[in-house]
Image: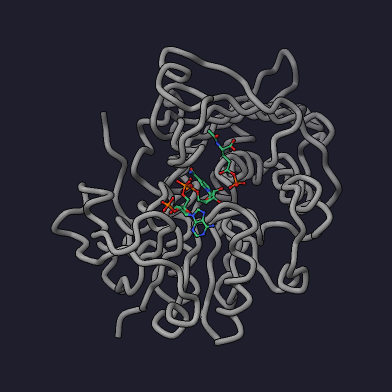
Amino acid sequence: MKIKVGIIGATGYAGAELVRLLSAHPEAELVALTTQSYGGKSFCEVYPHLYKYVDQKCCELDIPDLVGKADVIFAALPHGHAIPVAREVLKQGKKFIDLGADFRFDRREVYEQWYKVEHTAPDLLEQKVYGLPEVYREKIKSASLVGNPGCYPTSVILGLAPLLKHGLVDTGTVVADSKSGVSGAGRGLSLGNHFCEVNENFRAYNVGMHRHTPEIEQELGKLAGEEMVISFTPHLTPMNRGILSTVYAKLKQEMTLGQVRSIYEEYYRSEFFVRLLPPGILPQTKAVAGSNHCDVVPVVDPRTGRVVVISAIDNLIKGAAGQAVQNMNLMFGLPEITGLNRPGLYP
Ligand SMILES: NC(=O)C1=CN([C@@H]2O[C@H](COP(=O)(O)OP(=O)(O)OC[C@H]3O[C@@H](n4cnc5c(N)ncnc54)[C@H](OP(=O)(O)O)[C@@H]3O)[C@@H](O)[C@H]2O)C=CC1
Ligand SMILES: CC(=O)N[C@@H](CCC(=O)OP(=O)(O)O)C(=O)O
């Protein structure tokens, strides 16, 4: 019997990637694709690249109907909207994976401060698991509620995790500089994201105040075993998809590149999706576009005593839909790479 899957917000960019991945997943069956604006339309009218692969119609959200039909529900909604749905899904004993920010934080006050909405189900924050399999695999296997990580946090956390876990980083010195493609902002129209504003342009935004900062701090702090504050600067680049993060940190002790690389090799040895690239190859967004990989390379700068880690992901795949499917696989006892074992698209 296949896993019956419902997707809320299926007509957004992250939702449509879920539809594409799950329509080719050997153990999943799509049973409901919800939308706000396209109720009754065929999904392929909205996303014609899936013509002949997906034959469902979009429907408006009807929570009892959806929960009745599906074994697992993914939400790819603006933040705040997943909370009431999660409550109902869990009450009926089904599983819930939220691609937004509603179930990423351990402390409700942090979410409310940065997202400017009240968290109406703080009790659920206690039972949620942060959906980064490379860090929380065992907990995800038995979770009913997963808060899928943000796209920038995925690239930064995977970039620094091995060194933090070994206590090798001076935790007050971390700077993360990330560049994202425009699909990271979703499909909805906005002034900052239309063609003339983005094309042939490159700019920083939300400097010192981006909402992913506290999420990155929460997770890096847990790896380090102490509270952390970091500097995080996101940038918008004129490409459709991809995130390249450059993370700088002072090492607590002098280390050679060989020593640092051996720590990454050991930490990621059995990970399929995180690829420590060989010396001489640096991560780039094109090499991970369309795949669930996170490519990582640490470099040691002996002049400054800093490590510089470069990481690349596809914001819509390892940064959203792919990671969510990886979590679903774990939650249903499937091999983690089911439906995801394909390389990126190049060029
Ligand atoms: N884009 C990315 O790279 C990433 C996104 N995320 C998160 O995933 C979530 C979705 O993002 P994204 O796909 O980019 O956003 P989009 O704006 O592209 O899609 C949002 C989806 O939610 C639907 N929707 C909006 N408001 C409501 C509502 N009130 N009730 C029901 N449905 C609604 C929209 O319907 P309609 O299509 O009809 O307008 C659409 O299907 C967000 O929380 C985002 O932060 C996380 C990581 C990466
Ligand atoms: C390029 C771009 O605009 N990216 C988005 C990514 C944020 C996102 O997806 O945020 P949540 O998942 O936390 O809601 C942004 O910076 O707001």
Quadrant assignment for ligand 2: top right
- The answer to whether residue 121 of the structure is visible from this angle is yes
Does residue 99 appear left or right of residue 239 in this picture?
Answer: right
Say which of 94 and 81 sits in front.
Answer: 81
Residue 181 location in percent, x, y? Answer: 46, 30
Residue 171 appears in which quarter of the rendering? top right
Percent position of residue 296, x then y: 51, 37
Q: Is residue 337 left or right of residue 56?
A: right
Residue 88 appears left or right of 169? left
Depth check: give the residue in front, 36 or 346.
36
User: Could you tell me residue 303's position as x and y percent?
Assistant: 72, 13
Q: Residue at x 70, y 44 (%)?
A: 216
Residue 31: x percent and y percent? 33, 74
Q: Nearer the viewer, residue 199 or 322?
A: 199
At horizontal 70% and vertical 41% (from top left) the residue drawn is 211
- Quadrant containing the N terminus is bottom left
Placement of the C terminus among the 4 image quadrants: top left
